[in-house]
Image: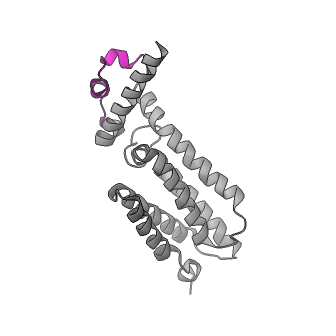
Amino acid sequence: MQYQKEVVRARIIASALTEFEKHGFLDAQMRNIARGAGIATGNLYRYFAGKDDLFDAIVKSVYQSIDALITDQHAHIHHNQGNVKLVVKDIVAKIMLVFTQHGRELLIAADQSRGSKHEDFWTVLSGMVFQRIRQEMQKSADDTDDLLINLVASGFLQGMFTILRNIKEPRRAEELINRMLIFYFDDLSNRLRSY
């Protein structure tokens, strides 16, 4: 019996992924999810308390993974002393790891979470990247304005996620992201320095 519950739960999650990708959290319908899973709508509520609970089950692990990876990276990278490009390259590698494992869920969290308790995903992710860039720049005694650092961090992330949304071949996506790293972070301190 337990096996049957796991199979039904997996079908619900698969159907919900499709529904949330297509319609976002706000416009997703539980009846569509139930239909896609091949169960009655009432039966869906035996597995998940509601749409919030179901959405949370899909994106929570991605949210936690990103937070843990960037926090872990922050705790262990001390040898880069002011090398923003290396820090961002490591952040990219960690986001790509999550994307490789949970790509659909990551894009749902980033693009389709409006109205859910995870709607701040993009703001939180952007803020974490901003903080890491800022800390690295401070190590090199750089007095760059926080607004400029924030613009660089959010612009880079927007570009990276645009690539992830549109390029299906991993090597090509990685190539484009590496080009963006050069564009955004080569000689960043000098380019942002006030004159």
Depicted 36 relative to depicted 101: above or below: above
Residue 147, given in percent of the width and then of the height, sits at 53, 68
**Relative to 91, is 40 above or below?**
above
Q: How is colour applied across the structure in the image?
A: one colour
Determine the residue positioned at 56% across, 81% down: 187
Query: Dividing the picture into quarters, in which one does residue 143 lie?
Result: bottom right
Per the image, is 30 magenta? yes
Q: Position of residue 192 (x, y in %)?
A: 54, 79
Vertical relation: 89 (above or below) 6: below
Residue 128 painted magenta: no
Q: Residue at x 47, y 41 (%)?
A: 118
Question: Which portion, as a residue range, is magenta?
Answer: 27-48
12 left or right of 95 in image: left
As drawn, is 63 to the left or to the right of 50? right
- Residue 77 image point, x, y percent: 69, 62
Q: Quadrant of the C terminus?
A: bottom right
